[in-house]
Image: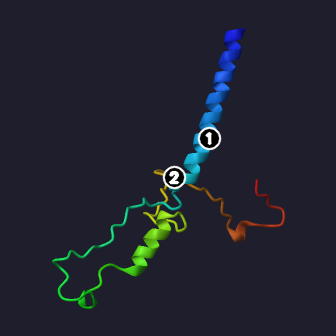
Amino acid sequence: MFFVVNLIIFYKEKAAERAANKIFTNLTKRKQLGRGEFKEYEEPVALPSEIKGSLRLAKTEGNLINEHVKSLQARNILAIAGDKETRKLPKRLKRKFVDKWDIKKVTADSTRH
């Protein structure tokens, strides 16, 4: 009996630990909002040998809008688009039989079945 009680307590502690880990990962892990997969964005860096003269004459690198979108995606604010899932048709289509009546044969006393 003592062993069974200890086993029940052990399983309750494990369940509480799993619940705490689930909450922790839910709060810290990046969620998948869209169909796509998040790819880390590396900001372009100009090496000192590439900069000639003053910084005012240096050409800008990168795209401000792309950097902002990647930042929103990294913070789970914006969904990441992926490949659109195509709808698969069944391999064999169902046949539909329609019972059509000739208008000339329909009379007041004729029945369908």
Using residue 63 as the reference point, say whether residue 11 is left or right of it. Answer: right
Residue 71 visible to the viewer: yes
**The image quarter in which residue 17 lies:** top right
Residue type pointed to by label 1: Ala
What mark, if any, has residue 9 been given in the picture? none
Residue visible at 24% across and 76% down? 46
Are there few (<14), some (14-19), or many (20+) residues within 10 Å of tag 2? Answer: few
What mark, if any, has residue 29 been given in the picture? 2
Residue visible at 71% across and 71% down? 104
What mark, if any, has residue 20 been given in the picture? 1
Q: Give the spatial CA distance, label 1 vs label 2.
A: 14 Å
87 and 57: which is toward the camera? 57
Q: Residue furthest top?
A: 1
Mark 1 or mark 2, earlier in chain: 1
Using residue 103 as the reference point, say whether residue 56 is left or right of it. Answer: left
**The image quarter in which residue 98 lies:** bottom right
**Residue 111 percent location from the top left of the image:** 79, 58
